[in-house]
Amino acid sequence: MQAIEAAIGLSERTHSGEIRFAVEAALDAYSLLKGKSARERAIEVFSQLRVWDTECNNGVLIYLLLADRRVEILADRGVHQKVGDQGWADICREMERAFRQGRFEEGAILGIREVTRHLAEHYPAQGENPNELADAPVIL
């Protein structure tokens, strides 16, 4: 968890975007009975963590559902328009591949690095660069 927080902190020095990383062991029984997907849960978490509430609409959530070994990346409308669904999906699949091989820290850092690449390209750091969202990963 410390490595993830450090990677996000370093990342956010290179761009004006905000990255949140959330980990959830499993969906609760109610969500499972309703057939909720990892994507639907990630949308809820995106809202709960206020990732959408950045000045430049460039917040990104990396959501990891451990029970299903699923990764979902959700981005605010500003950055999502520039990267698109396929760009985020490619990062998710790379992370999931690393996790299947038991390389959890490496997979998490890889995902942060790839998100950073997109944010730095489209939202390079310029002048004052306030940290709008906490860098520490969230355990749900």
Image: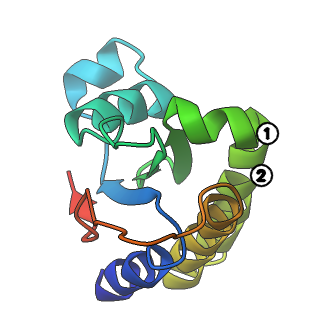
Whether residue 4 sits left or right of residue 100 in the image: it is: left
How many residues crowd mark 2 within 10 Å: few (<14), some (14–19), many (20+)?
some
Foreground residue among 41 and 132: 132
Q: Residue furthest front?
A: 127
Whether residue 72 sits left or right of residue 137 in the image: it is: right
How many residues crowd mark 1 within 10 Å: few (<14), some (14–19), many (20+)?
few
Residue 98, given in percent of the width and then of the height, sits at: 66, 73
**Residue placed under numbered mark 1 in the picture:** 86
Residue type indicated by callout 2 = Asp
Mark 1–mark 2 Cα distance, whole angstroms, equals 6 Å
- Numbered disc 1: secondary structure: helix
Which quadrant is the N terminus positioned in? Answer: bottom left
Q: Quadrant of residue 83?
A: top right
Vertical side of 14 occupied by 66: above or below: above
Vertical side of 83 occupied by 52: above or below: above
Whether residue 81 sits left or right of residue 16 in the image: it is: right
Q: Which mark is residue 90?
A: 2
- Numbered disc 2: secondary structure: helix
Residue 32, given in percent of the width and then of the height, sits at: 33, 24
Vertical side of 33 occupied by 89: above or below: below
**Residue at position x 60%, y 68% in the image:** 116
Q: Mark 1–mark 2 contact, CB under 8 Å?
A: yes
Residue 61, given in percent of the width and then of the height, sits at: 43, 49
Q: Quadrant of residue 28?
A: top left
**Residue at position x 53%, y 68% in the image:** 15
Q: Which mark is residue 96?
A: none
**Residue at position x 47%, y 61% in the image:** 16
Residue 29, given in percent of the width and then of the height, sits at: 22, 27
Foreground residue among 124 and 45: 124
Residue type indicated by callout 1 = Gln
Q: How is the image coloured?
A: rainbow
